[in-house]
Structures are given as structure tokens and as C-alpha cells.
Amino acid sequence: MPLSAAASAREILTGLHDIMGARGSAQSKLDKVVDLIAEKMGSEVCSIYLLRDNKLELFATHGLRKEAVHVTRLRMGEGLVGTIAAEGRILNLAEAADHPAYIYKPETGEERFHSFAGVPIVRLESPIGVLAVQHADPRRYEDVEIEALQTVAMVLSEMIAAARLVDGARRSRLRSAGPLRLSGLKLVAGMAKGHAVFHEPRILVEHTVADDIEAERERVYSAFRKMREQIDNMAKEAEFGVAGEHQEILETYRMFAYDEGWSRRINSAIDSGLTAEAAIERVQQRTRARMRDIDDPLLRERMHDLEDLSNRLLRIVSGWMGTAAQTGLAHDTVLIARNLGPAELLEYDRRRLKGVLLEEGSLTSHMTIVARAIGVPVIGRLHDIRHSVEDGEMILVDGDNGSVIVRPNRALQSSFEHRMSLSQKRRAEFAAIRNLPARTVDGVEVSVMVNAGLAEDAASLPMTGADGIGLFRTEFQFLVSATLPGRDRQLRLYTKVLEAAGNRPVVFRTVDIGGDKALPYLTDEVEEHAENPSMGWRALRLSLDRSTLMRAQARALIEASAGKVLRVMFPMVSEPWEYEEARALFEEQVEWARKGHRKVPKKIEFGAMLEVPSLAEMLDQLLPRVDFISVGTNDLTQFLFAADRSDPRLAQRYDWLSPAILRFLKRVLDQARKAGVPVRICGEMAGRPLEAMALIGIGADKFSITPAGVGPIKGMTRSLDAAAIKSRMDQLLAKPPKDVRKALTDWAKRHNVTIG
Ligand code: PEP
Ligand code: MG
């Protein structure tokens, strides 16, 4: 190569700019482009192949026989050119004929040439063509020459798309890709159909050639600075478990964000004449190409982190930092993300959001709970989903089975629609029984309430057929709000909820913030680094320390319940004194209201949530002081098993139907029954028919569950003989088999219990 790579690439870019700006057909421009590249790179052959009707057609060449233009066509994957396009990889060969994919096309006259280098021409991560150079001497091209070729390919892709020489980058891949079936972890059941939307949209690089290289350098420099700041902040916020990102990912982000090699490569791409956006994308393409050759899954995983970061940098540099929620959803949407926080999910338009697909995610994370509450099916642990789907592609979500079909054909779509209508029918059947009592065949009454947290949930309470709201998560209001909701705003919500509930009871839980329920406006208060946010300064611990917050909430709840019964409970009570302190705070507020001649509730029922195992050891002290106990199995399980509820790697590891959990719960239920204190199970566990059946078998008769579970749980209860399951559970817990779930499923089938 006569000039330095950057200098020759820059000369080519300037030349390309002139060619593009001049008059002439697209074909004549491409002819000039290959001449220009051959001359500036000092190569004997330069050819451009473009994807047309799924074939790579020789569109222009300098050095090969002209008769071959528009005649030589290769399938994706065929020959060297087809391999480059199909695998998105770079080939750099001293002896082309030695490569296993080499095929000889006589019309081109290429037998004279020994060395070969080719790079894919890519648009929106899809190959649209190949740019190749050849030499008579057997030689390998230097890295800098390959980089120059990539830079040119990058600019060419813009020009090719603008001239509409290919059918469209996305469609070309779509056609070749066909339907794709994936399976993941079922997080929220339900079926949905919609178009793929990325939570963090990808940026389409529009302008590739820089007008002012210095200015581009400056743009990248400040984008890097901003990105590093963001990552550092995210790491700080992780103390509160921000947006579901995990510590490990943040560490990798940080490592890449400060990686000198990465910024150097971007800068040298800018030196060759690219805009900041194009340079970031060019370097990313190169990384992607290298990634394809890596076998190590761990390393590939890390490469995805770099990809995330590269997209972030691209978004910062192009000034578009928002999520898809800010742009609004244009049609029925299946949202795709690595992970989502509960607040991020709530930003989406619920009429259009039909499903969520995540690469991570776990069953009891708050984002999953929120999705369940608003009835959006979610599938998690879909490995690499963000790289298997294109923006706008049709997706079928089968949340009942944890499977997804991307780009379905007509047959797949119609069978899915058939199943969807069956599932709707099943829902209609549940709807028909939802107002019937949840009474077992042998006459045991089970109380079924729902978990809620938004004003809309309360409004739809009568339609759920539930006996009331057994857990109103007051922190949801805090999560969806940009600023801390004051007493008045809280008062308005609680009043509305109580009005909507009418005669049905509502159990308010005081705020449970912290853990994975991050509040951006409160994170500053956390000074020390929290290694385990869900076991950290959260829920009642935080409320007792920030008593102003708790006092404002107490006043709002007391005022909203004036003249009525106020039912209130405290989350994450670990020892009885915490409960006593919280209760005393409420009682002081009642006193204060009385003194001010304000109306107060006619009665207050106080309860404690049992979700930290230590409390179970103190029940003898606690039970005489409470009106009720509410068991939060989501947290309880994570603490009993020492298994982080939001860690996707542990999502399937521990079973709610394990003897450890069931024996633990049975002891609590027995002890509370003896003390005459009602116990309600309000974690996600109780909303699943098989689990609820086991719970009835250990003596539970009060549940608070997700609204969609009311029909199925009532259906199960109405087909169950409580005495029979009790004796079966006694046997199973006395001598547990290896797989309690299987034993219970078999039992339910044998006894015709409707478990769905
Ligand atoms: C629980 O932990 O089971 C519970 C109901 O509370 P949350 O899921 O809101 O932490
Ligand atoms: Mg909890």
C-alpha cells in the first residue's frame, strides 16, 4: 500500500465524496469507486458484490473481466465472497485457492490472482454486500489495509442504501433468516403477538464522511467522558439495585469504558475521515467480526457487554439517549431488552405493550411482579435475543410455555392464533367462576385477595372476583414518580383505592423501597456501598431511619381511612421491636390527628410481613401483638436459600415446592393458628395452582395473589379435597421424595384437581 492506511483511506473518502456528489447513474458511480479504491490502495483488483434477490452479484470491478459484471452471482455462504457475507467475517488470504470455501468462476478470469482480502458491507448489522481486493502476488494484507477497506465499506453502505441498489438491509436478512424458535424462562404467563421494539433503540448511522476531523475527535472525546460518568453513576446507584443491572456487568462496562485500546481504535477510524458515529460503528463491526471466531462462551458474553457500551456511546454521540418509551409505541409491541427495572417498564404505553423478552430476568424480581400486575407476558433468559431479532420484526410470545417465535410464517402464525384463542377461552372459563366462592369440595373456605399497587388495579378489583386487596404495594407510586410523592399525593391515591374497593378490605403495606426497587431521587442518601441491596438498607429499615417519610405516609393512610378500618402492615420485619416501633409511630400519628380534631379510622389493624426468616423464631413474642401476619414468599425464599431473587442464574434453582420452604411455612401456620392470628400468603408462590394446592395442604387458607391468578386458583380450590391434600402433604413432608413437585403433579392428576 503506497500511503499509510489512514491517509489512503482518507483520500479514498474524499474521492468517494466527489463521486457521490457528481451526476451519473449509480452503476457509473460504482464503476468509478472500484477504480478509485484500486488506485489508492495500489491493488490489482477491486470488486463490489451486492446482495440482490438473496444472491451476491458482482456489481462493479476493476481488474476482473468486465463481462462477469452482473453475471457472476453467488449464494450466501458460497465461495469466499458468500462466506464473508453469510458469516459477517473478514477474509485475508495469501493464497485464495487454499481456502476450503474457494470456488473458481471462469468468467471472471481471476485465476491469475493469488491473494485475496474481503470485508462485508453492512447496514444495520445485516450484510448487504462484499468489498474485495486481489493481488497477483501471494501476500497477506496488513491490518491497517484491512481497516482501510472496512472504512471504505462503511461509507459505501451509506451510498448503496441511498441509491437503493439493494432491496433493503433488513429485508435481505429477513428473507434469508426465516422463522426462529427460542425458548426461555417463563416469567409472566400469557400469549401475545407484536412487533419487536428495542428498549434501547439502535442508532442508524446516517453520515459517514467527516467534514471536520478535529470536531469529530472532540465529539468522541466528550462522549467518552459522558459515558464514563454514566457508568460510574450506575455503579454508585447499584447500591440500590438500579434498573436490574448486575454488579458483574457494571464491572465489565467499567473496564471497557476506560479501555484505551478501544478509544484509540475509534480515533484512528476518525483520522481516516469517518464521522464519530461511523468510527464507533466501524470499530464495532470489526469487534463483531472477531467475536464470531471466539469459541469461549464467557468471552463472547463479555463481548456483548462491549456491544452494549458501543451502542451507548453511539447514542450519546448522536444525542439520542432516550429509551423506546420516550419515542412512544406505534403499534402492538414486544419489547426487547437485556433487563428492565420496574420503573422503566411502567413508562411504556400499556395499551400497546403486549409482551416483554429479556436476556436476563427472574421470577420474583419487581419488574416481573409489575408486569404480572399489569398483565404483560414476560419471558426471560432468552440468550442473545437482542442479536437474533431485528427492529420491527413480528414476534409471537407464548408466555405459557416460555417460548418465542421470531419471523413466523403463515402456518406458525395461524397455529399460534388458534392456541391464543384457546387460551382466551380458558380465561373466559376462569372468568365465569371468578365470582363463585373459593370453597373446596369438602367445604373449606379459602379467601382469595389480590396484590395491587396502582390506582387502576383498585378500580378493576370488582372484575377480578377477589375478596379484597391483600397487599397494596405503596412503593409503586414512588417508583412511577419522578419526585418523592408527598403526603397529599399519597392521600389522593389511598382515598381513591379505598373508594374503589368499597366494602372489600385493603391491606396497605408501608413503602418497601431499596433492593431492586430503585428510586433515583433517593439514591444520594445511600452513602455506603451496598454489596447486597436486597439484604441492605431497605423497606422498614429505611422507613424507621427516615421517619419523616414514614410519618407522611402514616398521616396519609390515617386520613384516607377516616371513619373506616385501616389495615396496615410493615415489610421486612426482622425482629419484633421493629414492628413495635413502626406501630408506635402510627399510633402517635393517630393521637396527633385526634388532638387536631381530625377524623381518624374507626379501627386500625396492624400486621407484620414475615419474609425474613429470623422473625419466625420470635413468633411467640410477636403474635400477641399483631392482628395478622402476611408471608412474603418472594423474599422469604431468597433469604431461606441465600439465593438472590433477581439473579437470573438462580432463577430456576430453588423450588417453592421444596420441603424446606413447605416445612418452614407449616410451622409458621401451625403456630399462628394456635395463637388465633390469621396468616395470608402474599408472595408470587400463592398465585400458582400447584403451589397453592400444597399451601392448602399445610393449612393455609388465605392468599393474596396476582389478579390473573384468581380464576385459576379458584378453579383449583373448587376441585380440591382439602382433607385429602392435607394427609398427602403430611406424608410428603415427613418423608420427602426427591421431587416434591412431580409427586404433587401426579397426585393432582390422579385426583382431578384443576392445576392448568
Ligand atoms: C414478597 O417478598 O413475597 C412480597 C410479597 O413482597 P415484595 O415482592 O414486594 O418484596
Ligand atoms: Mg418482600
Image (cartoon, rainbow, N blue to C red):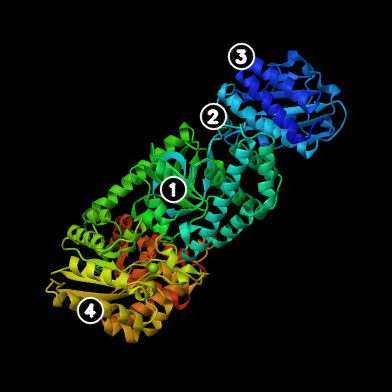
Disc 2 from disc 1: Cα separation: 23 Å
Q: Which label number is shown at residue 25?
A: 3
Is there a contact, CB below 8 Å, between mark 4 and mark 2? no
Q: Amino acid at mark 4?
A: Glu
Residue 542 left/right relative to 432: right
Residue at left 31%, top 72%? 548
Q: Amino acid at mark 1?
A: Val
Residue 467 left/right relative to 277: left
Disc 4 from disc 1: Cα separation: 43 Å
Residue 703 image point, x, y percent: 30, 66
Q: Amino acid at mark 3?
A: Ser
Give the foreground label among 1 and 3.
3
- Residue 232, compared with residue 672, is above or below; it is above
Disc 4 from disc 2: Cα separation: 66 Å
Q: Pick whichever of labels 4 and 1 is earlier in the sequence.
A: 1
Is there a contact, CB below 8 Å, between mark 2 and mark 1? no
Q: How many marks?
A: 4
Q: Indicate the secondary structure of the residue bearing disc 4.
A: helix
Q: Quadrant of the C terminus?
A: bottom left
Q: Pick whichever of labels 1 and 3 is earlier in the sequence.
A: 3
Give the foreground label among 4 and 2.
4
